[in-house]
Image (cartoon, grey):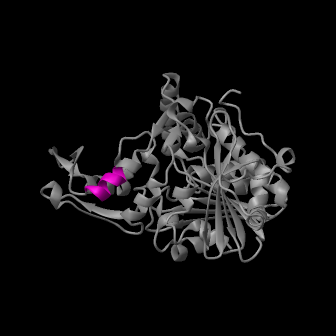
Amino acid sequence: MDRRTLLTTGAAAVAASALPATARAVPPAAAAAATADTPAHRVARALGADPARASHGDGWTHLRLTLPGSPVPLGVDVLADTRRPPRGIAHLLPGGGLNFAANFFTPRARNLAHHLRAQDLLVIGISPREDLAEPADLTASWGQAAHKADAAAVIAAVDGALRLPYRLVGHSAGAALALDLASTDGSARLRRVVAIDTTGPYTGERQARAARTRDVIQARIDAGVLYGDTGLQGLVSRALTDPDGASSVPRPPDPATRFTNAALAHFALTRTSSLPGDTDWIYRQGHSAGAFAFGATPLDDRFSLTHTPLTTWGAATQALGSGLVPHALLRDLAAIWAGDTTTYPFDWSGIRTEVVWVNAALGRGDEPHGAELIRAGGNRRVTFRVVPGHGHADPVWSGTADRDVWPHLAP
């Protein structure tokens, strides 16, 4: 089978399949418990998934599933409450280069996945296929349509098995995917889309810049450059393990000097929009809210993060898989920002369910045009708000997100 073949496993084809046996002998009573008809295990059977690992805590269980794929499997996480049955499902869709563990299951003690679980929701994280890929696996076909098909197949299989109301919750590129899925999902059980710090079509100069970005990325694809790497894992790791060590990057006030590792990480995280990457301009300021001031020497630079500690960034980036981002996906996202429905067709008027859209003022900022297009299509159940003082990642990782941001995501 060609590696570009999309996941098509459905509930009907796999409903009778059993979870794979563990490597060690299991007593009959334990075996019966392991295959109990819990929602998490029903999801695993519906997806025909191979449970890669399981973890447990006070009142919850987490299954990491690996869905068969050729040649790259798809990672799906299931977080379930063990004290009470779910009243609904939250499908969580990570941002570009991230996976469920990094985006929504960090920090481990207090995260958005547990927040949703505590609302009697079965949490299902659908990581992008490239998370488990090697660079050679990526092709020019790994764009928005492929990501949408993967997620839609998982959602349909779970819906067929559980028949519970569900919501789509996405961050960044995952939020664009959630909105895209909702535009073609006519199920009465889809009750809400939650979009966290993302962008629909821009207007004015930013729309023109998005079109230029689309063309630059397409040129890279045409030249055979099919993916990029955010580089955040190494950047943050060096800042934590060797903070005062010299990086290879010159400091703007004195190019003869170099950022320390810690200073470089803080500058990149808080001043992302000043960096030269193809899509860095989309941030109003940065990935994280924070302060940065150059000093007389590299060791005199002063910096801090306002909401998300660097240790949380470290935990998140260490949870990454490949960290790769397909250029085909970035091109399609740029087309969405540009309002280019020829490169990637996106029907904003097709979103009929409730939409809760929360942006970060220093991340994607006050860009409500996507929400306005949904309203213009006749859907009045749309709210758009901007959380002040937050960077792009802060709405999910901030130490106070459960008070500052998550209440806005609706119960």
Within the image, what quadrant is residue 318 found in? bottom left
Q: Can residue 212 be seen in this view?
A: no
Q: Is residue 408 above or below residue 169?
A: below
Within the image, what quadrant is residue 92 found in? bottom right
Q: Nearer the viewer, residue 210 or 292?
A: 292
Q: In this view, does 151 lie above or below 266?
A: above
Q: Which of 301 and 125 is in front in this view?
A: 125
Q: In this view, does 289 lie above or below 145?
A: below
> Could you say where residue 302 lies in the image, as x and y percent from the top left?
23, 63
Q: Is residue 26 visible?
A: yes
Q: Is residue 408 left or right of residue 264?
A: right
> Could you say where residue 270 lies in the image, as x and y percent from the top left?
36, 58
Which residue appears at 71% of the width and 36% of the height? Answer: 6
Look at the image and tell me in which quarter the N terminus lies: top right
> Could you say where residue 158 lies in the image, as x and y percent from the top left?
78, 55
Dominant secondary structure (helix, strand or loop) of the stretch shown in magenta: helix
Number of disc labels: 0
Look at the image and tell me in which quarter the C terminus lies: bottom right
Which residue appears at 48% of the width and 74% of the height? Answer: 400
Within the magenta stretch, is there residue 192? no
Within the magenta stretch, is there residue 236? yes
Q: Which of 360 and 376 is in front in this view?
A: 360
Residue farthest to the top? 223
User: Which contiguous range is marked in magenta?
Assistant: 235-242
Q: In this view, does 344 lie above or below 382?
A: above
> Could you say where residue 223 lies in the image, as x and y percent from the top left?
48, 22
